[in-house]
Amino acid sequence: MFPVGEEVAAFHSMIELWGNIVQENIYDDWEYGIAQGVFMKGLFNMTVESFVKSVIADNYEKLERQFSLGLVDANTGLFFG
């Protein structure tokens, strides 16, 4: 997916992907409302991992470069990569 020389196309593809994200791609409301998140889990019930995995799965056969992905827990500052 985007061999050497197609950096501009890769840039535009990423802008389109991330620019079209909707709330449902990133987080869900907690089953019992915000109180569950505040007192038990965290403010958001993150689904971003499944979204990113689906993007990778949909394009895995077309990947032409190595890449790395990292996420940061906004509650703790821990980096996951």
Image (cartoon, grey):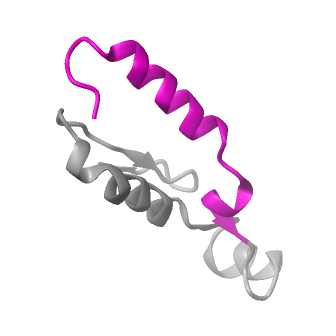
- Horizontal relation, residue 39 to residue 66: left or right: right
On screen, residue 50 above or below 73: below
* Image: magenta residue range: 1-28
Task: Please report the residue visible at 33 percent of the width from the left and 59 percent of the height from the top.
Answer: 57
Using the image as rendered, state which of residue 40 and residue 13 is in the foreground.
13
Q: Nearer the viewer, residue 54 or 47?
A: 54
Position in image of residue 33 (x %, y %): 82, 81
Q: Is residue 34 left or right of residue 45?
A: right
Quadrant in the rendering for residue 70: top left
Task: State the residue in front, 33 or 35.
Answer: 33
Question: Residue at coordinates 50% horizontally, 22% vertically from top-left?
Answer: 12
**Front in this rendered view, residue 57 or 25:** 57
Name the residue at 42% across, 48% down.
71
In the picture, measured across the screen, residue 61 lies left or right of residue 79, that is left
- The image position of residue 29, as x and y in percent, is 75, 73
Q: Is residue 52 positioned above or below 27 on the image?
A: above
Quarter placement of the N terminus: top left
* Residue 54, quarter of picture: bottom left
- Find residue 34 and report its image quarter: bottom right
- Residue 41: where, in percent of width, then height? 62, 76
23 relative to 36, above or below? above
Magenta segment, principal secondary structure?
A: helix
In magenta segment, residue 50:
no
Residue 68: % across, % down: 26, 40
How many numbered marks, from 0 up? Answer: 0
* Position above or below: 58 against 13: below
Q: Residue at x 18, y 34 (%)?
A: 64
Residue lying at the far bottom of the rendered structure: 32
